[in-house]
Image (cartoon, coloured by chain):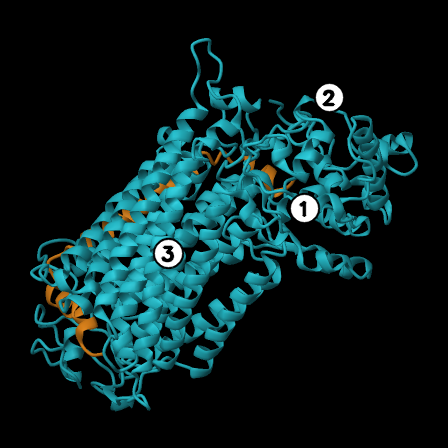
Chain colours: A cyan, B orange
Amino acid sequence: MQTDGTGTNFEGERRERATGEAGVDATPRHTLGHHSGRMESYVYNDAVVRKFLLMMVVWGIVGMIVGLLIAVQLAFPAANLGIEFTSFGRLRPLHTNAVIFAFAGNAIFAGVYYSTQRLCKARMWSDTLSNLHFWGWQLIIVCAALTLPLGFTQGKEYAELIWPIDLMIAVVWLGFFGTNFFMTLVKRRERHIYVALWFYIATIVTVTILHVFNNVWIPIGLAELLTTGRMPSKATVLESYTVYAGVQDAFMQWWYGHNAVAFFLTTPFLGMMYYFMPKAAERPVYSYRLSIIHFWSLVFMYIWAGPHHLHYTALPTWASSLGMIFSVMLWMPSWGGGINGLLTLRGAWHKLRDDPILKFFVTGVTFYMMSTFEGPMLSVKSVNALSHYTDWTIAHVHAGALGWNGFLAFGMMYWLLPRLFQTTLWSKKMSEWHFWLGTLGILMYIIPIYWAGVTQGLMWRAFDQSGRLAYPDFVETVTRLMPFYWIRIIGGTLYIGGVLLGAMNFVMTWRTRPAKYDEPVHQAPALSRGYQDAPYPASKLTSNIEFAKKGEVFLNGWWHRRWERLPVKFTAWVIVAVAVASLFEIIPTFLIKSNVPTIASVKPYTPLELAGRDIYVSEGCYNCHSQMVRPIWAETQRYGEYGKAGEYIYDHPFQWGSRRIGPDLGREGGKQSHDWHVRHFENPRQLISQSIMPAYAHLLESKLNFEEIQARVDAMAMLGVPYGKAVLEGNAGEMARRQAKKIGDELVKQGGYEGMEDKKVIALVAYLQRLGSDIGQAAEWDPMAEFIPGGNLEAKSAPAEGEAKKGATP
Amino acid sequence: MSLTDVMSSMKLSAYPQVALGLFLIVFVGIVMRTWSKRGKGEMAAAARLPLEED
């Protein structure tokens, strides 16, 4: 048994008491069987921590360099080298997935595996699961790094990974990591479950729930194989359609998206803060009580906040208002937690001067507080009206990711390195350099990008004296940002420079490791099986009725202290809190008709348009183009009528986007000629010299696979999209060919290229020409009628099912 | 009659507000219990857990 260096020697007996009701209440402990279990020996599994920590650094460098590359592309579009695999729309998801799930993910696993073992006084339950978890997660990352540049994506932000990888994530996260973690809790030798572990519990259960419910899909190729026996094409095997559409998909996606921030980038890192900050400061957390409030507030409130990503969209107002209110409320517990972290250094602030680890932690927590002030502010509708779709969001997330997640991870790394490799840190001075380069890098990243965001937001809404848009050409508002984009590149480079110093320090420290790691054997008594919690104390009330006495005892909170020792019950209550909140929000949106009024003239996409939409998703167009005009004067002036819920009911997945690096496309249909679009795809700078859009010349060369369109249409029909005759075998492909021929002929008439009718670009043009144009059509129009084999008459005699319903029109 | 029809006719517009109330009550309960007088020593002991061993 080791001492903690402050003279407190925690013997087994004493710990039993300490975790009970130490010294406050003399109620005798009521136990069955043994008082405490027999002494047991155990050795920590630090090998797996070393592996996760290494991969945190490796993937951190990879993810950040991809980020740097796409930052360069924004300032200098030719930096994608004209290759389809390195275009912004494909690499941006790779960047976000790599830094979130690979860099932060491996940091979480390193931190959780190290601290859980110590806090539970137990080795991780299964070495096999620890290893499966490690290798499984790295395999997922490699699969992501291969599929995303190839254009395989689900088209939902931070949930881009395709369905087979989704399944792998579920197995590795819950099956390997979750099982290993919870079994370690069950087999622990410390009765009380420290607050860091609560944050880990919330992380594991909530991420599982979010991941599963946001990824309910129909795999296109697999569905085709099972229902018709036809062998699907290579592409459709890996593709899927989400079962949610339009508003509901947006709602689910941001319920997921925001809670991914909450339960992947916040709660596990807070757990790590509550463990590693006391370690580094060599004193307990400032207020354990505050940490409890911090925990429950986040669990209760975060889950509601997602809709603040959808202000002024077609989402029902009540949902967006609720999201705003809960987001503003989150400010307080977040700051309570942040202050709790900072005040852990009470009486030890002088250590900050020469301890780089504390510098990382304190700055990290400061960025946590900055982000959790800014988040609530951005969720206020009137602020969001300006900030949404601009770089302000980008600056906000980078303050959080680089400052909070990055610095907490690196602070933890420097604390762990000498302990894991049983040596001294190779260069403390170099870690100081890492800190200062990183801090300067963050500031040089976020300040210009805040500036860019506000600048562009103000330019979008500026009117001249005659009441017209002051900057009617969208590209003007982009060109203005170029100086900021170049400064960001410098900031990002500095931050990566710091990380490279950290990597070097890692390697050099590793090289001074002992030939064989010392594996100290620890001892602690097993938790006795027969342990039973002390009975509830008698009420201090004397002359009241029985109910009041029970109430008094209840309010003293004994029940919560019991939960804290019962991992299964505790976990169950976290699940209840998260699930109830989610259901209260989600069910009404899905089941109350008034939330998604249908529009009679909105019809499904034609087979060709659907194929084009899938190309749009695959190229990641949503990373730069929104499809949601907000009911704001400046936007309806610029783009046209605002987006309505009923317009998106066939959008699996929704493509509203979150950032307008290019203009909104929600009303693109009919705005430009086919020829304009084709030449624009070939090279945008042929038409708009200052455009920063990547060239998509490959779409003019590669052929569209007409054969697989049937599978796409059939999968959509399974989801309830009324495709009528298009589902008859062979029809979808034939209809697509006819429409492609028509558009190809029109293109030639407009003076465009010949021979485009079998190229991918034609499908994409078909989709763009349709976008947002349905509300201008008559209620009974049928976009597919003229392409159905057999002709119009046949089609009219068999109206598509489900179209009879006529809901509210705008 | 689909589930949607049933749900739509149930006039559930106050539903989210009810949830808000419920959550607020539970939250206040947790705050009260956390700051209740008892358990101070227990809190101090719990807070020391990370410092126990490496």
Q: Which mark is residue A738?
A: none
Closer to the N terminus: mark 3 or mark 2? Answer: 3
Going 25% across and 61% down the picture, which residue do you hit? A433
Q: Earlier in the sequence, mark 3 or mark 1?
A: 3
- Dot 1, crowdedness within 10 Å: few (<14), some or many (≥20)? many
Q: Which residue is mark 3?
A: A265
Q: Position of residue A763 (x, y in %)?
A: 74, 40
Image quadrant where one finds the C terminus of chain A = top right
User: Quarter holding the N terminus of chain A?
Assistant: bottom left
Give the residue number, with chain letter if any, for mark 1: A614
Asked which secondary structure carries label 2, the reply is: loop
Question: Is residue B51 positioned above or below A170 on the image?
Answer: below
Instruction: Give the chain of mark 3.
Output: A
Question: Where A55 sits versus A608, above or below?
Answer: below
Give the labeled residue for mark 2.
A778
Q: Is residue B16 visible?
A: no
Q: Nearer the viewer, residue A603 or A548?
A: A603
User: How far from the left and from the top, in percent, is residue B37?
Assistant: 10, 58
Instruction: Compute the Cα span from label 3 to label 2.
Output: 48 Å
Residue at left 39%, top 78%? Answer: A48
Determine if marks 2 and 1 fall on one subunit: yes
Residue A46 place in picture, x, y as percent? 34, 80
Give the amino acid at mark 2: Ala
State the residue at coordinates (75%, 46%).
Answer: A701
Judging from the image, mark 1 belongs to the subunit labelled A
